[in-house]
Image (cartoon, rainbow, N blue to C red):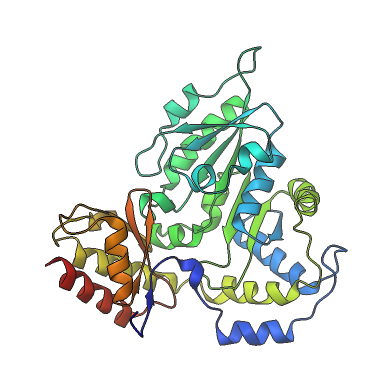
Amino acid sequence: MHEKISDFRSDTVTRPTEKMRKAMAEAVVGDDVLGDDPTVQKLESLAAEIAGKEAALFVPTGTMGNSIAVKCWTKELEEIIVEARSHIYNMESTHITFISGVTPRPIPSKRGCMDPEEVERNIRKPTVHTPRTSLICVENSHNNWSGAVVPLNNIKALRDVADKHGVRIHLDGARIFNASLASETPADRYAACADSVMFCLSKGLSAPIGSMLAGDASFIEKCRRLRKVLGGGMRQVGVLAAPGIIALTEMRERLKEDHDRARRLAEAIAPLPGIKCNPDHIKTNIIIFDLEHKKYTVPHFLHELAERGVWALATTGGIRFVTHKDIDDEDVDRAISVFRDMLS
């Protein structure tokens, strides 16, 4: 194994900054389940303000945030509309059915953008044979579409459809700040189109743990109960909220560096034999590409990359590289050099 590792597996591998570690050590804490942890209160107030919502809830993971939202907005035997390649449908251990008891109806899309007319055609009223559609889930940026940004106009059109039929919208905004920077659209404008929004602190924003779920005050009050039911009621959790505050106040703007490095990497590897990648599709920090090479299968290719100190993951659609705070220009140069050495 190579001594120096360039870890492109995910932006979830980011380490907290020294300032975050210091804030954790010095955090003022209380019992958050009893509602008296001041650092958590500060984080939740900040998150709600950034999202343009009345209230927010600190949760351990994005998956828990999404599962709480689905459970809150739906009843058993109902149906929700999801994008066919979405994270909430494909990569969250079936909590839609297991926890909420609802059926997902996947809709194909154009790089994460569902056609509002097709969504409307798939909204169903309850009969003895069919369930009621109660929720539409949107993902932005979209993980499995190489970090694609769903345009604001598309989400606004879905909002119009939802309002027409009395359906809620949940925004899986795990990487909403990547989408916001790439599109030059404030995050609260995206969130305004949704009844609830979840966003992560622990990906590109580099906090060690945690996500936020935001919505109106009555929604968050119910979500707090659901968090407890799912085992997410934490006690002196201000030690984890403290780095989350730094993540939201100091780490959002630097995400542009990740976008620039991802685009540079994609442009360098796209011309190489066997690589099927369109650099024009790389808008944020995720590169997903197909590999069709007579010498390498995907597992073999990933193994050989790792032997040369470059880590990545297999995923739907091929191989995924993700740039983040702990990937610098030297790491990108190393990856480009290894690709050229292996494929040229």
Please tell me which residue lies in front, 307 or 176: 307
Q: Residue at x 44, y 54 (%)?
A: 141
State the image coordinates of residue 249 (x, y, percent, origin top left). Answer: 58, 74
Toward the top, the furthest residue is 128
Q: Residue at x 40, y 32 (%)?
A: 115
Task: Give the answer, above or below, for where 38 lies relative to 187.
Answer: below
Q: Residue at x 58, y 73 (%)?
A: 207
Q: Is residue 278 left or right of residue 81?
A: left
State the image coordinates of residue 167 (x, y, percent, origin top left). Answer: 61, 31
Quadrant including the C terminus: bottom left
Give the number of marks: 0
Q: Is residue 204 visible?
A: no
Quadrant including the N terminus: bottom left
Q: Is residue 301 visible?
A: yes
Task: Give the answer, above or below, for where 86 lies relative to 76.
Answer: below
Task: Give the answer, above or below, for where 84 lies relative to 139.
Answer: above
Dividing the picture into quadrants, the one containing residue 75 is: top right
Toward the left, the furthest residue is 344
State the image coordinates of residue 304 (x, y, percent, origin top left). Answer: 27, 69
Q: Is residue 64 left or right of residue 319?
A: right
Q: Residue at x 22, y 74 (%)?
A: 338
Please tell me which residue lies in front, 128 or 93: 93
Toward the right, the furthest residue is 34
State the image coordinates of residue 17 (x, y, percent, origin top left). Answer: 55, 83
Q: Is residue 228 left or right of residue 196?
A: right
